[in-house]
Structure formats: C-alpha cells, structure tokens
Image (cartoon, rainbow, N blue to C red):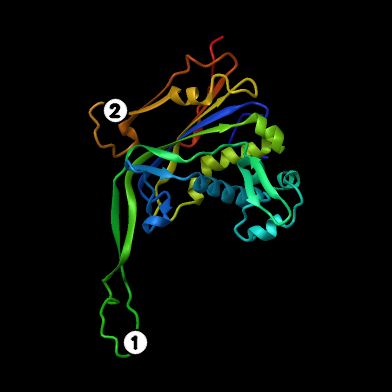
Amino acid sequence: MPSEAIPFSLSPNLAKVCIGLIDVVRSNPNGDPARQGSPKVDPWGHGRVSHGKLRRMCRDYALEFYKVDLAVHPDVPMDDMYAQFETTKSLLAAKWDSRVFGDAAPGKKFKSKATGTFGLNAAMSIDPVSIEQGDLTRCTGYKKAKGNDEDDDEIGASMGSSPFVEYGLYRTNSPIHAINAKRNGTTEEDLLIAVEALLYGWDYDRAANRPHVDLRRLFLFEYPSHRFLPGAASVNRWVQVVKRPGVFDPSSFEDYDITVDTSQMSPGMVLHEWADGRWIDQARMAAK
C-alpha cells in the first residue's frame, strides 16, 4: 500500500474535493488531433487538458508502480477485456480504473455502466494561453528516388513544427464521491494510488514536446461524512488564483497570487495542502 507519498488516511467513506494547479512552460500538455496536435484550447483561448489525458497518466503510473489490473490497458483490446466479464459488478471487483474512474462501455455480454469514485476533471488554464510554433529541422537526408529532383529532403530543411504553450497555469477541480466508492467497492488503497499518481505521474509522462508540465499545488478538502456539505462548487470557490497587481500577461507561476479561504469550512472538515513536492506539515481544520 502507498505510504510515504501520502502521510494520512484517505477513507473512501468520506467525501473529498481535490483542486490541482498545473504549471505548463513551453510544453504541449495535451495535443488536439483535430488541430494537427496543437495544444487544446477552448473558443476563448484558454488551454485545456482533457480528463482522458489526466486519467491515462494516472493509469500508466498505477500500472507501472503498483501493477494494478486495468480495464483500459495499453496491451489488451477492449473487446477481449470485456469478454471476460458477465456483469458490471464483476468488472468493478477486478479492475482498479473502473472502480476509481468509472466505466461506460458496451461489452459482448453486457453494457458496463458505473460512475467513478474520483471525478478527475479536465484542467483549464486560468488565463488565455499563447500557442507558439517550434520548427523541426531535418538533420539527415533521404536517398532520392531515381528521377526525383525535388530537394525537400535536404539536410537543414524544415520537416514540420512542434506547437507548444509558452506559459499557462491550469486548474482542475475534482470531487471524490463516497457514495460511488461504496457502490464500486473502492478501497482506501485504490484512492491512495490515484492521488499519488496525480501528484507524481508527471515525471513519467514527460516527452520532448512536454518537458515542463508539473503539478505545483494540490488542495485536498475532506468532509466529515459522505455528503458534500457545503457543496463542491462552493469549496472550489474558496481557492482563488488571480494575477498579481501589474501583471497583464503571466509568464510564470510567481505571477499569480493564491489564497485559500478556510473560514467557511464546516465543522469537521480538514484541508491537506501539497506544494512543490511535499505536503505542508500542518493540516488546516475547520474552526470549532
């Protein structure tokens, strides 16, 4: 069971809200196939990292370090995987990602339908992002076909581009549902692995086009029961991320002020904060 990465319990019987801040520097955090791999943006220019991308990173981490059984496995065709099960209940009992993230796929014998325990949502940038183009230059040539006089394969010629976000601070607001945990049979170990993957999976997801994509802050609010009281949307508003005075075009994490209003935490609520690789020693608890 994970122990060192998360030095406190994560009871599946208690509702939680996770708020993560992701720092993107000259990287492509999530390419859009419909735009030739350019970083995903919404119509207003805000960067987006899909929930599918974040969950895939967590699956890969969990598979590599904890050898969990996955429904969405890189080496197993979906039809073959679902053919092994007769019911959603049996699927949930066997597959870590189905319990944690949910499952909704047609199988040969049944249609799987389960709402996930950890609603890991898409991350959106706080401000609009600037998309830059990095040229890829050929460093070796091809042997030309006979009769082909074109010179587009010469050394030094451009062979495409690698678009990236110059800078963006992205935010994801994600609830953990105790009621769904009970329905799915999600264990504390399942949740510990999932949160650890969200914390540390970035180092194992790096590539030439995303060298600097990192989680900088995680705020984990835990309720004293299975109910979201106050609601998760209200808790999300307690964490405010705004540009510092005089900053018009943010270019670093330090260009933002981050404040947390704990005065509205209901009795029994606890806040755990993670910053730049470590948990802050003292958990904040609601005033009695």
Q: Is residue 154 above or below residue 237?
A: below
Circle 1 crowding by C-alpha within 10 Å: few under 14, some 14–19, many from 20: few
Q: Which residue is mark 2?
A: 244
Q: Which mark is residue 145?
A: 1
Crowdedness of circle 2 by 10 Å Cα count: few (<14), some, many (20+)?
Answer: few
The image shows residue 23, relative to residue 35, as above or below, that is above
- Tag 1 secondary structure: loop
Residue 68 in the image: state x and y as whole percent: 67, 49
* Quadrant in which residue 169 is drawn: top left
Asked if the residues shown at circle 2 and circle 1 are in contact, with their CB atoms under 8 angstroms apart, the answer is: no
**Image mark for residue 54:** none
**Quarter residue 195 falls in:** top right
Give how far across and how far down residue 120 sits, in percent.
54, 39
Q: Position of residue 116 (x, y in %)?
A: 62, 39
Q: Furthest-top residue in view? A: 288
Where, quadrant-wise, is the C terminus in this rendering?
top right
Viewer-proximal residue among 120 and 254: 120
Q: Which amino acid lies under the numbered mark 1 shown in the image of this protein?
A: Ala
Which sits earlier in the primary sequence, circle 2 or circle 1?
1
Q: Residue furthest bottom?
A: 146
Residue 208 in sight in this render = no
Up/down of 91 relative to 74, above or below: above
> Which SS class for mark 2?
loop
Residue 109 at x, y percent in the picture: 74, 54
> In the rendered image, is residue 198 in sight?
yes
Residue 245 or residue 87, whichever sits in front: 87
Q: Amino acid at mark 2?
A: Arg
Residue at point 35%, 36% (across, down): 253
Q: Horizontal placement of 110 versus 34: left or right?
A: right
Q: Quadrant of the N terminus?
A: top right
